[in-house]
Amino acid sequence: MNSTDITAYLDRIQYSGTCKPSVATLSALQSAHLRMVPFENLDILSGVPLQLETAALFTKIIKHARGGICYELNGLFAELLKGLGFQVTLLSAQVASADGSHGPDFDHLVLLVHLTEPWIVDVGFGDSCLIPLPLQGPSPAPGYRLQQDPLGWSLQQRFLTRWQRLFSFTLHPRSLEAFASRCQFHQTSHASLLNQIPLCTQVNSSGRLTLSGRTLTRTVGSDRSQQVLTEPEVNAVLLHQFGIDLSHPRHHRLKQLFTDSGEKLSLRTADNRSQ
C-alpha cells in the first residue's frame, strides 16, 4: 500500500495519531477502524460479488466508505498495517456454534501481528474486541481472553459468570486467496448466516449499534433496546450512523433489501435471536 493510499485509509478511519509500529499504535488503529468501518453483509444479500483483491477492497471500503465481512475488513486492514511497517500474518479461524461445535477452516480471518510479542487483531467479527490481545499473558480487555484449546487457540468472551468460545484458530500462516472458497460459500449458501438477514453493526461512542433487517438494536453496557424502523428511518440510520448512502446510484441494489421484504426480515431476525 503506497503513501497516498495509507493517507486515504487513515482519513477514512479518522486516525491522526502516530504511525510508528507499537502496541499503542496498533491498539489505536484497531479501535479507530472498529468505530468508523461497519461489519456488514449488504453486498452478499443484494447479489454483488465480493472481491478479495486489495484494489477492489480499497475501492469498496475506503473510496466508497462501505464496510464488509471478515475477509474484506481484516484483509485490507492487514495491508494498511504492513504499509505502516507492522509484520502481519493471516490466520484461519473456525467459528464456534452454540452447541459447542466449530465451523470449518477459513470460516473466519483473523490477524497475528508480531511486535516484541505476538498480538491477535480482529476488525471483522461483528461484536469485536476493541483492542489487540496478546497471545500469551493477561488480557488487557475486560471480558475477552485467549486460551489454548484442542484446535490450537481460542478467543473467548465472558457472558455473566461463564466464558464462551467465539472462535478457534491455529498459528499456521495463510494467504488471502486461501479464504476465497469459504468466502464464496458465505455468498451463495443459505446455510450461512451471512446470507440470510441484512446486517450492519458498528461500535459507537456509547456502545454498539446494530441494524438487522429493519430492527435497530442499541446496546449500552448490559442494556439493550430494539426498534423496528420504517423504510425512511432505515435509510437515515444507514446514512448517518453507518455512512452508507442508499440514494447513491451504485447502491441501487442495496436499497431493495429494506423495501418489499422489510417486515419479514425483522420477523426472521427476532426468530433467529429466540433460537
Image (cartoon, rainbow, N blue to C red):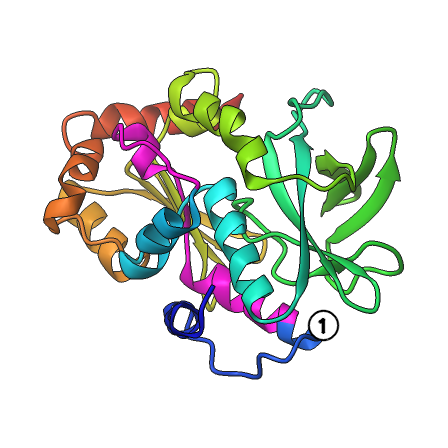
* Nearer to us in this view, 165 or 82: 82
Dividing the picture into quadrants, the one containing residue 84 is bottom right
Dividing the picture into quadrants, the one containing residue 198 is top left
| Residue at 17 percent of width and 39 percent of height | 255
| Residue at 39 percent of width and 28 percent of height | 269
44 vs 190: above or below: below
Q: Is residue 140 left or right of residue 80?
A: right
| Secondary structure category for the residue under label 1 | helix
2 vs 239: above or below: below
Graded by Cα atoms within 10 Å as few (under 14), some (14 to 19) or many (20 or more), the crowding at tag 1 reads some
244 is within the stretch colored magenta: no
32 is within the stretch colored magenta: yes
Dividing the picture into quadrants, the one containing residue 49 is top left
| Residue at 66 percent of width and 39 percent of height | 174
Q: Is residue 220 visible?
A: no
Q: Position of residue 165 (x, y in %)?
A: 74, 36
Number of marks in the image? 1
Q: Position of residue 245 (x, y in %)?
A: 19, 54
Q: Position of residue 172 (x, y in %)?
A: 77, 39
* Nearer to us in this view, 199 or 62: 62
Q: Which residue matches tag 1?
A: 23
| Residue occupying the far front of the picture | 2
Q: Amino acid at mark 1?
A: Val
251 vs 265: above or below: below
Q: Is residue 13 left or right of residue 109?
A: left
| Residue at 41 percent of width and 75 percent of height | 7
* Nearer to us in this view, 52 or 120: 52
Q: Is residue 248 visible?
A: yes
Task: Provide the residue span drawn in magenta.
Answer: 26-52
Q: Position of residue 225 (x, y in %)?
A: 42, 48
